Amino acid sequence: MTYEDERHMMHMKAYLVDRLGWRRRDEIEGWDLDTTFEQFRIQYHGQNKMTKTEANKAIWRR
């Protein structure tokens, strides 16, 4: 893992600690890259996996 990847992962974990609470910090620190990224995506973007373009297209389908 490069320095930039480690730094990005550190920022994602800091965001997750802020969102999920400091009591889960030890658990969050133990996550690998895949788990960290998946949890970050869920917390930051929500459960909706649509891209912005797909969301805009969905507006016109209604």
Image (spheres, grey):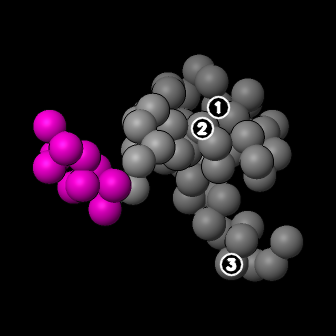
List x then y, in percent, for residue 41. 52, 45
The span picked out in magenta is 53-62
Q: Residue at x 85, y 72 (%)?
A: 1
**Amino acid type, label 2:** Gln
User: Relative to 55, is 33 on the left or the right?
Assistant: right
Say which of marks 1 and 3 sits in front: 3
Point out the residue furthest to the top here: 23
Residue at the far bottom: name it: 3
Residue pointed to by mark 1: 25
> Secondary structure beneath disc 1?
helix
Amino acid type assigned to the residue bearing label 3 in the image: Glu
- Given this view, does label 2 or label 1 mark the residue nearer the observer? 2
Earlier residue among tags 2 and 3: 3
Residue 59 x %, y % = 16, 46
Q: Which is more toward the observer, 60 or 53?
A: 60
Disc 3 designates what residue? Answer: 4
> Alpha-carbon neighbours of circle 2 within 10 Å: few (<14), some, or many (≥20)?
some
Q: In the rendered structure, which amino acid carries the disc numbered 1?
A: Arg
Q: Which mark is residue 39?
A: 2
Number of numbered tags placed on the structure image: 3
Q: Main secondary structure of the magenta part?
A: helix
> Mark 1 or mark 3: which comes first in sequence?
3
**Horizontal and vertical percent position of residue 20:** 50, 27
Structural crowding at the residue carrying mark 3, measured as other residues with C-alpha within 10 Å and reported as few (<14), some (14–19) or many (≥20): few
